[in-house]
Amino acid sequence: MFHRTCKLSILLASTLLLVSVASADPVASPDSTTVLLQKAVNGNWRSTAHKARDPYRHPVETLQFFGIKPDMTLIELEPGGGWYTEILAPFLYAHGHLIEASAPTFAAKLKADPAVYGHIEKVISFAPPEQVHLGADNSVDMVLTFRNTHDWLNHSPITLAAVFKAAFDVLKSGGVFGITEHRAKPFADAAESAKALHRIPQDYLIALALKTGFRLTGVSEINANPKDPEDINVHRLPPDLAGPDSEHAKMKAIGESDRMTLRFVKP
């Protein structure tokens, strides 16, 4: 009985916090977006491990840079473990629409916690290069991708270009394509660095987006890390620490990877 009561109490507390995040007026004040984002970031549905990465991933500042608003229709590309989904879902709960472009297995995470994810509009199949279509043309306000572009480039430059084209097509005029990615050294060989280091040169992504038809409207150093030498595989760094034990202290001193943060707009 005690454990059941505790479980119900935790569920009720989580639901009340989600209601608080969702019910706030999105235009109540100039700071309302910041308040809503911070509430989502502070949510007790986020694990301690995920919250520990906030100082490296800067979710509030990153989403503000992209220009997110609570009433947007937004597509998140390949959310992986759902680190950003845990923030986007409650933020957009009341006034917006969140669409997850993901493998079918991601739906299991969403079904496991309907209090947080129950308002997600849908999960669409997304498996480049076989499936990259994101929906009707000119239908969404924002498309976001977090540290995915190197994976698509690893498949082929054509695959990465197809994803950029799909994002361009689904966005409305004035819609935002937001990217964060592990940064390689300037003008490095993009395909080689993506494969060996899981990094892409910033100039390569900007050139591809411009070729696709986007306009570059912002470059931010929010997620930069000057301690990162940019010439090592990102998985050797935290949180993975995939290298030998003898280098873990050195890698922890560097911190997570240096990342570019780019905002593009469809004309």
Image: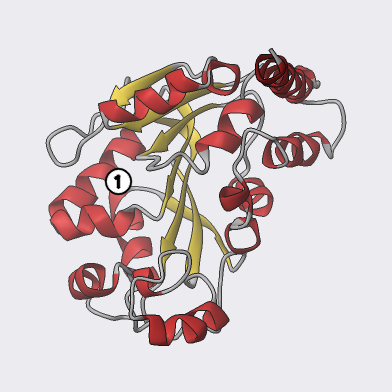
**Position of residue 228 measured from the top left corner of the image (x, y, whole percent):** 48, 81
Q: Quadrant of the N terminus?
A: top right
Crowdedness of circle 1 by 10 Å Cα count: few (<14), some, many (20+)? Answer: many
26 shown above or below 5: below
Q: Quadrant of the C terminus?
A: top left
How many numbered marks appear?
Answer: 1
Q: Residue furthest front?
A: 1
Residue at 18% from the left image edge and 74% from the top image edge: 192
Q: Amino acid at mark 1?
A: Phe
**Position of residue 147 measured from the top left corner of the image (x, y, whole percent):** 40, 55
Residue at 42% from the left image edge and 22% from the top image edge: 139
Label 1 sits on residue = 164
Residue at 63% from the left image edge and 33% from the top image edge: 45
Label 1 sits on a secondary structure element that is: helix
- Quick one: 172 or 239, which is closer to the camera? 239
- Quick one: 258 or 105, which is closer to the camera? 105
**Position of residue 113 measured from the top left corner of the image (x, y, whole percent):** 52, 21
256 shown above or below 131: below
Image position of 127 (left or right of 164): left
Quadrant of the rendered image containing residue 55: bottom right
Image position of 170 (left or right of 2): left
- Quick one: 207 or 68, which is closer to the camera? 68
- Quick one: 221 or 88, which is closer to the camera? 88
Image position of 265 (left or right of 12): left
